Amino acid sequence: MEQANWQVDDLDRIVITDGPGSYTGVRIAMSMAKVLCTRKNIPLSVVSTLALYAGLDKNVFVINDARSKRAYCAHYNEGQLVHEECIMTLDEVKEYLANHDVTLLGDSALVEQESKEVDFAQNFVNILPYASVVENVHTLVPRYLKENDAYMVKS
């Protein structure tokens, strides 16, 4: 805000991503947004991290590192989901990419490929119509796609 020469009173809305992604990173951003929105009594809206990567680009597949040889993934076309947001193993990602003619965005090095550069600022502007207004900022929690291994049944 300092670099943009903005003051807190200049804010009239906050839009953040709600995940998937680094759980701690998403929680920190979410906490800051909640405080600002509560203090200023302004609306808070959320978009998916993967949707932010995709923006309104045509036929893109977004991949973000989920650790343990897995990735958060989604296939978008002009802002619309083609394949739901999910977690895939890197082998599943490679298979998906082999069977679909898509432009890759995100952590493409995970699958030894190159990706198109993303203009996050422009994408935020472009996908604002898809942002969901949070009715109660106090109940907002990160969307976390990663399975919790501690609760998985061992067979």
Image: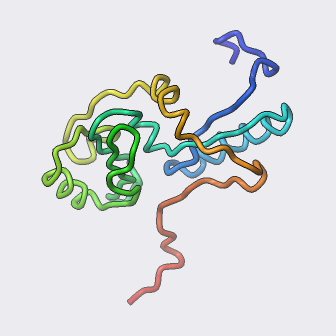
Q: Quadrant of the C terminus?
A: bottom left
Outermost top residue = 5
Out of 22 and 55, give the one closest to the viewer: 55
Q: Is residue 36 left or right of residue 44?
A: right
Outermost left residue = 98
Q: Give the percent coordinates (x, y) of residue 94.
A: 19, 54
Looking at the image, which residue is at 33% across and 33% down? Answer: 57
Q: Give the percent coordinates (x, y) of residue 121.
A: 49, 23
Q: Quadrant of residue 59?
A: top left
Q: Quadrant of residue 26?
A: top right
Looking at the image, which residue is at 32% across and 27% down? Answer: 117
Looking at the image, which residue is at 51% across and 29% down? Answer: 124
Out of 68 and 54, give the one closest to the viewer: 54
Q: Is residue 141 left or right of residue 47?
A: right
Q: Quadrant of the N terminus?
A: top right
Is 100 located above or below residue 91 in the figure?
above
Scheme by which the image is coloured: rainbow
Q: How many numbered markers are drawn?
A: 0
Q: Quadrant of residue 51?
A: top left
Q: Is residue 59 left or right of residue 26?
A: left
Out of 66 and 126, give the one closest to the viewer: 126
Out of 81 and 71, give the one closest to the viewer: 81
Looking at the image, which residue is at 42% across and 86% down? Answer: 154
Is 40 located above or below residue 62 in the figure?
above
Q: Give the percent coordinates (x, y) of residue 90.
A: 26, 57
Q: Is residue 21 left or right of residue 39?
A: left
